[in-house]
Amino acid sequence: MKIGIINVTGYAGIELARILYRHPEAEVVSITGRSQAGEMLANALPHLARTSLPIEAEITKSVDVVFSALPQVASAEACIPFVRNNVKVIDISADFRLKNAAEYQQWYGVEHPASDLLENSVYGLTELNRGLIVDAQIIANPGCYPTAALLGLAPAVSNGLIEEQIIIDCKSGVSGAGRGLSMATHFSEVNENVMAYSVGGHRHLPEINQELRRLRTDYEPKTIFQPHLIPMTRGIHDTIYASLTDKINRSVEEAASEITEIYKEYYKSDEFIRVVDAPPQTKQTWGNNDCLIYPTVDKRTGQLVVFSVLDNLVKGAAGQAVQNMNVMFGLPETLGLEQLAIYP
């Protein structure tokens, strides 16, 4: 397959180039970068020196699929010409995730540049939408927070195990903010500090609720979603709380065991989802495409508690994008993504 990467110099684009370099069926033939066009990739990003391609202002080669790693709005504008020309597109930004154009405008502050394409885009959470991804032309790669949250909630919501009130308490490494400079991600501000942000509502909330509704038609989630920035480079750690329905009416110990088995059965065919036996750590997913999930029941309140962790740049971005590409082109889903986590 011939591949183009739009904005290879952002963190998601950098990770895409790294993963695709060792993908046996992929050949990256054209890459763009907004600020470093004209440079060789090896000079701009020396750790990718084995990939000897020029960074250009536009995709100049014929390609089978384009990955866009631009920020929202700019990404849609760059993707539209490829979609109109029947090239498959995998968008890592938020531009094609929400089906409702008015909701997109509410959360992103601008009118969608191609609202007619929203209905045909497929939300690319591979484990939940694999059947739709196969024939899709536009894949909307999920956000990193929603990937961890939805994978942590899907078995419980699908099986009617939890009430509609959900609390998702999230922690993210600094790379989730992108490569651009800002005071909020300055080393002196982030180091030895933890900060809640988007307290009035985060842009990932509507896609979480949208996809939870798709899991069960009679489910109307009442979601509190609160992200925090913590002083590490990579990683997403979601802790999720919800009250159990009367479908689970055993003792706490029996309920926890039953729910664990439900989760394991739900993900038994998914290579990248591991339902683990102890609370997972972000470092256990550093550099790989796994999502580690630990469901349990709180002994004092009887509430479901789910811990869900992943690498925000891999399963939360570039790795999931490649996983979606594999499904779109009928390749083994794990191709190019078999690496283990880097530890310590």
Image (tube, rainbow, N blue to C red):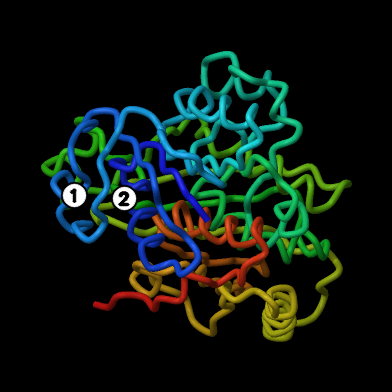
Quadrant location, the C terminus:
bottom left
Asked whether the residues under the numbered discs 2 and 1 touch, taking CB atoms below 8 Å apart as contact, a structural biologist would say yes
What residue lies at 27% left-to-right and 78% top-to-bottom? 343
The kind of residue on which mark 2 rests is Ile
Asked whether, in this view, residue 327 is left or right of residue 246, the answer is: left
Name the one closer to the observer, 217 or 41. Answer: 41
The answer to which of marks 2 and 1 sits earlier in the sequence is 2
- Mark 2–mark 1 Cα distance, whole angstroms, equals 8 Å
Res. 250 visible in picture: yes
- Counting from the top left corner in percent of width and height, residue 192 is at 17, 52
The kind of residue on which mark 1 rests is Leu
Q: Provide the secondary structure element on which disc 1 rests.
A: loop
Residue highlighted by disc 2? 14
Asked whether, in this view, residue 169 is left or right of residue 33, the answer is: right
Above-or-below relation of 258 to 199: below
Mark 2 crowdedness (10 Å alpha carbons): few <14, some 14-19, many ≥20: many
- Counting from the top left corner in percent of width and height, residue 72 is at 47, 29
Rendered image: mark on residue 45: 1
- Counting from the top left corner in percent of width and height, residue 252 is at 69, 80
What residue lies at 29% left-to-right and 28% top-to-bottom? 34
